[in-house]
Each structure stands twice: as structure tokens, then as C-alpha cells.
Image: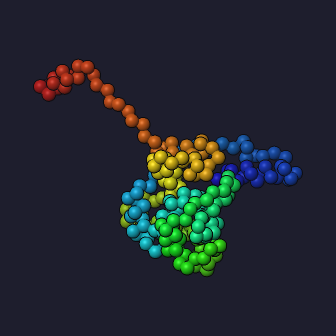
Amino acid sequence: MEYTTIQQIYRWAIRFGLADRNPASDLWTPPQRPRDRYITHEELQTFCHLNPEWGAPMALLGYALGQRLGDILALTYNDKQLVFKTQKTRKRAAIDMTPYLRSLIEQINPGIEAGELTVKNANGQEYDRHAFGHRWRRCMDRFVKAGGERFTFHDLKEKFVTDSQTLGLDPVKQALHDSPKTTQIYLRNRETTKVESLRLESSNVIIGAFAEG
């Protein structure tokens, strides 16, 4: 992320005449393996059990909506539909309000009214990523202390995409991605290929010989 930021800074510098070359373009960075963290249903249930007041409804809302944290934090409440405009792809999408979604949102924000932010801090204002991350980490620390494996809020989106495919839904549409290649990043490390075992024709004779020996 630091490398990408430096590259972008120099692209802007060149555009506005503040630099004549991009030194970051010659840097080499080691390849990073994509995350392969699938949160099981049991793990999510345990996390929720340990964090009933805020962590549970927040995690379940993140899983239910399957969108990026920034989009969820900017989402305004409507008792008919939740309308997204993603920050990354600028796509618009609507999710019908259900009693389940409403109950999660009301646990996070009791007494919420239409037009208000769906997720607010104690002062009724929008969370910034730092404040949200701090509160999320406190919940996650309880989970880890109880023997769980740490996961990020974004891992809930990966679970959402993976489970959507398992349920027969279109994961590209569900994730609001522009390209199936992007969706495949979320899926490729959780797909399992079934491999058949092989048997030597004379294996029974060989096994019998070992048994006699």
C-alpha cells in the first residue's frame, strides 16, 4: 500500500510539473499472496457470542450486506430499501429491508430514523476507519483470547461472496464487481478440486507380501 501511494504521488507530481520522473516505477516489491481466510459459520457464531452488544450485530450486518467497510459506514437508513453507491466502482445497488436487517441495525443504533447513518459512533456521527478499527480490534481480541483465529472486517465480504456462490447466487452481482476476475480473487483460494486416488493393479499382492513379512 505504501508503494502504491508513492507511485500515485509521483504521477500527480509529474502531471502538475513538480517532478520529471517517477522513481517508484523502478522499485521491485516481493509478490504478496492473496488472503485465504474463510470465516466458518462456527467461528462467526463464537465471535458473536463473545461480543453480544456491538460486535455481534456489526459483524452480522457486514456479512449480511457483503459490502466494503467504507460503503457500510456511509450508508443511510431507509425502512424500505438500503441503497448503496460503492466508492470504488460507483455502482448503485439496492437491498430490500427485511425484519432481520432491521433488527441488526436497531441493535447497533437504537431508535434510528430514516435518513440517518446506519452505523454511528457514540456521538451520533459517522465512524472514521481509525475509530471503527479500534472498536473492532477490542472485539477481536476477546475472540482471539478465547482461542479464535483473528479475521478482519473485510474478511466478512469474502465470506459473503463465497457463500453466495455456494447458495447458487451470482457472486459477481452480489459483490458489485466490475469484472469476474475481481470476484475470482475472493473465490479462487477457497475452491477445492476433487482428486481421485490411484491404485496399482497388483497392489493386493504387494500388500499381502508386506503383511506376511
Above or below residue 19? Residue 46 is below
Q: Does the rendering let one see residue 127?
A: no
Which image quadrant is residue 145 in?
bottom left
Q: Is 9 on the left-hand or right-hand side of 52?
A: right
Q: In this rendered view, identify the residue nearer to me: 36 or 83.
A: 83
- Residue farthest toward the front in the current orientation of the protein: 80
Location of residue 46 in the rendering, given as x and y in whole percent from the top left corner: 39, 64
Q: Residue at x 67, y 54 (%)?
A: 91
Which image quadrant is residue 73 in?
bottom right
- Residue farthest toward the top in the current orientation of the protein: 202
Location of residue 106 in the rendering, given as x and y in whole percent from the top left corner: 52, 74
Q: Residue at x 86, y 53 (%)?
A: 16
- Residue farthest toward the right in the current orientation of the protein: 17
Location of residue 111 in the rendering, given as x and y in whole percent from the top left corner: 55, 79
Above or below residue 127? Residue 193 is above
Q: How many marks?
A: 0
Q: Is 188 on the left-hand or right-hand side of 82?
A: left
Above or below residue 143? Residue 31 is above
Quarter holding the C terminus?
top left
Q: Residue at x 62, y 74 (%)?
A: 114
Q: How is the protein colored in the picture?
A: rainbow
Location of residue 48 in the rendering, given as x and y in whole percent from the top left corner: 42, 67
Q: In this rendered view, identify the residue nearer to me: 109 or 38.
A: 109
Q: In this rendered view, identify the residue nearer to me: 147 or 68.
A: 68
